[in-house]
Image: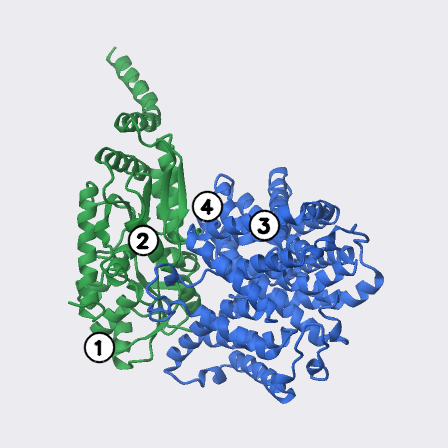
Chain colours: A green, B blue
Amino acid sequence: MRRIVALLVLVLLAGALPASSAETVADTRARLAALKPKDFPTQPLEFVVVYPAGGGMDTTARLLGKYVEKYTDHRVVVVNKTGGAGFIGHTYLATQAKPDGYTVGVLAGGVWSDAMQKAKDKWSHKNFEAVAFINYAPVTWIVSTEGRFKDKSLKDVAAAIKREPGTVKAAIVPSISFEFLAEQVETKAGGKVVKVPFQGGAPGVTALLGGHVDIATGFLSEYRGHLEADKVKVVATAAEQRTSDMPQVPTFNEVLGAKNMVWSAWRFAAVPRGVPADRKKYLEAVLAAALRDPELQAEYRKTGSIVDNPYANAAAVDAAIDKLAALEREFLAGTGRLAK
Amino acid sequence: MDVLNALAAGFGVILTPANLYYCFLGSLVGTLVGVLPGIGPLAALSLLLPFTFTLPPVASLVMLAAIFYGAMYGGSTTSILVNIPGEAASVVTCLDGHAMARQGRAGAALGMAAIGSFIAGTVSNLALTVASPVLVAVALRFGPPEYFAIMMLGFVTTLYMISGSRVKAMIMLGAGVFLSTVGMDVVNGAERFTFGSVNLSGGFDLVAVVMGLFGVSEILLNVEHLARADVFTRAIRGLLPTLRDWIDSWAAILRGSVVGFGLGVLPGGGPVTASFLSYAMERRLARRPERFGQGAIEGVAGPEAANNAAVAGSMIPLLSLGLPSNAVTALLLGALIIHGVQPGPMLMTQHPEIFWGVIASLYVGNVMLLVLNLPLIGLWVQLLRVPYRILFPCILLLTVIGTYSINHNVFDVWVMIAFGLAGYVLRRLGYELAPLVLAMVLGPLLEQALRQSLIMSGGTPAIFLTRPIAASLVSVAAVLVAVLVLRGVRVGPTDAAAPHPTLEGSR
């Protein structure tokens, strides 16, 4: 008798397992439907991306939109408001977009960089309120497996910079983290690096493969194909800790004994300040549900991003943004780029 | 033999009803956007990109690529019949194509453009098939000094390309370079000539500028001479070129294929530059260069072959390096990434179905376009036969929508209108606009390559002479400049109708 009961329980459990995971989507949909304000949304949601269609941020937003549509009945439209390396779109979101909940910016760290360096006090990152942390990808240094540093570590590279200053060529992108990181390495190593400017990480990687530079700065998504083909090697990541996707690669901080060498594409969703509380809460819940979806997380991992989310709610994301912006302000002020 | 097997597998992928359908759909849409002035492949691809998200990666890429080369076919139709480039790569086709149309030879021009495109498309596909593994290595040897050298060559050849006053062309080149410096400094990110305007911080959007300069100004000019309106309303006869046309064109088509393919492979090059360069080359090589601008068929066949060959050429860095060589292939790259396909050297081994499927689709699409284009030219003509009073407002509307759709910024529309008015005035004053646009495209690339090179060399220009590829390109440019100086810069003809004595004997 007991055996039959046990068997029955097993059968029930086995039957329940797939059913329960299939139900989660329906459950989530029901939970979100209960949270939905009566009058919102009645039109498609607009995800604003300040970089061109087809780029990393665009992909991030489109994937997110797809999974918002999976858990709700709302349509999501991705709008690329491009120009001025993102500044035009940032200014639009901060000063012109209506805080009605329909306009959601899918943003990255560039927004506080622009606020500090270009907005001239017309707006700041405080004009936004976060609704979700999406993912992040640390800035990394890579070398060619056939080049000068093919079997060298970051320590060796730093030593070479000190020993023969002005001979190590690194591909950077001017005025953003890529350049800032190279400057920090110069300070730590005690010698000058030849910083060759490119418009983006990928052209720098190509220059590395062609042997025109010794080091390229970039995100995993910009060189994953070459890494898998064993053409390039990652020497260090500008993350706080070693990342889960490359545990064997050290951080700049640990090799060079620094604390502030932390740079990444830190992606989040935000709305212009002043969205009604019920709408903002609803957006937070919808985005959280979409971002928890394992399929979306797998897609983001495929693009080279790290999806581990250490933030409990939108307020924690706002706090993290404040902290990252402060860290960058300190660097910018320290290098004379910003007054005070 | 491996290549043949792989290509056969590629045909296996493409020759399924669904993929054939998407290839056909892309070709049709591409021809349409090519025909319609104001909407080019870039605008069309960005508008249609979202619709391909639900398709499998192969189908989506096949369709998007078909739009790209379909537009190259379609663009010539509008250039020839209305004297408005259907898209940027057909700008030079206007010169002789429209002249032919005015002589009642529109049919031969259209036919030769389509057949030339087909031959070039197929020839360069063969080259793509065989060479893509090999060419990757060559592309990598192009660093900043080599790019600088090739841009210099681009500027110098422009001076050979123009048919009007050379001094005016130099003024236009200078103006173009200056306009291209508006916006962010490519090296230190500082703003230049923006006067504090947020909208100018990104510089002028090239599509808005081109649409204004060529689209709007053309319409303004045409409004002035409405008599031109009946040029293309005559029946189009004889789409098949005559033996004489073939004799004049075959070499131009082959040269156009080679030039286009080569420029397509190089980053920064692409259909637009290829068509300009091919035209310049044909005129230089012609036995009677004075025929150019007066309806020389090789001035249609060469550039149209070149822009199609460039499409196949630009697939090489895209598919084998994950390196877009122009804005359109950048969008194709984006489409790959959106589908979770990692572009790069591993694409060929990890996703052979995409790599070879797309290459096979280029063969199939070219056949489709030839079949589609020759009979359908009648249909496109009908489309263009709509009276000017209806057609012009529609084209203006399309340019406005097309311009707005790129960045979703109304400022770009104002830029387009301003450049339209400026273009009108400049053309009335006898300034050619092509050098202006070319300088605006090449300017930022030239500046960046120059400054990168000088940073690499620690400030000495010797870097352009110590690297073999850069040195040879610089020497060719220097020789071309020397020839110009010796012949006398000012001796250039002052209007398009005059012959071009300066080009004679300089070979």
| Callout 1 touching callout 2 (CB < 8 Å) | no
Where residue B395 is drawn, which disc sits there?
3
Residue hosting label 4: B339
How far apart marks 3 and 2 lie (CA) works out to 32 Å
Protein chain holding label 1: A
Pointer 1: what residue?
A: A190
Q: CA distance from mark 1 to mark 3?
A: 60 Å
- Whether discs 3 and 2 lie on one chain: the answer is no
Q: CA distance from mark 3 to mark 4?
A: 34 Å
SS for dot 2: helix
Q: Residue furthest front?
A: B224
- Taking A227 as reference, is B428 left or right? right
Instruction: Find numbered disc 3 in the image and state the secondary structure of the residue it sits on.
Output: helix
Q: Position of residue B395 (x, y in %)?
A: 58, 50
Q: Position of residue B406 (x, y in %)?
A: 46, 52
Chain label for disc 2: A
Q: Are marks 1 and 3 on the same chain?
A: no
What amino acid type is highlighted by mark number 1?
A: Gly
Measure the alpha-carbon separation of dots 2 and 4: 27 Å
Mark 3 is surrounded, within 10 Å at the Cα level, by few (under 14), some (14 to 19) or many (20 or more) other residues, namely some
